[in-house]
Amino acid sequence: MNRILGLDVGDKWIGVAVSDGLNLTAQPLTTIERTSNKKAYEDIEHLIHEYDIHNIVVGLPKNMNNTLGPQAEKVMVFAEKLKNKFRVEITYIDERMTTISAERVLIEGDVRREDRKKYVDKIAATYILQTHLDQRRDI
């Protein structure tokens, strides 16, 4: 079974998570610094090959009224390019509360404020991917 990649795409950082071999659980993998789109695509391409990825779950930052704003549009452009460039399937997951949930986990884990930035994006990506994996099981 192919693993699934989860992405929390931001302007400066991309949080990355990967599923286990059975696609039951999501684990935080890394955070990619988005110095340029070219470099970000190269880093993601490396992960696609390393983990034999055919599906990528991307967090879609919807507005609280469930509409798509400028940030969601940017994420979709980035994800569509991934889809076309690497021939992967893209699934979007509503990510409105993932960063807040990730912050809460880090606070409860007594992670110092200045260290939280290092982890919050990949934890958010883990929430995004786990949501997708759980929804697949419920079908």
Image (tube, rainbow, N blue to C red):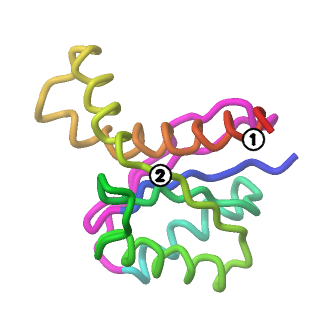
Magenta span includes 26: yes
Tell me the magenta residue range. Answer: 10-36
Q: Are marks 2 and 1 in contact (CB under 8 Å)?
A: no
Residue linked to disc 1: 136
Residue linked to disc 2: 94
Q: How crowded is mark 2: few (under 14 residues within 10 Å), some or many (20 or more)?
A: some
Image: 64 above or below 126 = below
| Secondary structure of the residue carrying numbered label 1 | helix
Distance between the alpha carbons at the discs numbered 2 and 1: 15 Å
Drawn side of residue 134 relative to residue 79, left or right: right
Q: Count of labels shown?
A: 2
Image: 52 above or below 73 = above
Image spot of residue 82 (x, y percent): 58, 77
Image spot of residue 111 (x, y percent): 22, 22
In the picture, the quarter occupied by the C terminus is top right
Q: Residue 101 carries which label?
A: none
Image: 28 above or below 90 = above
Which residue type does callout 2 highlight? Asp
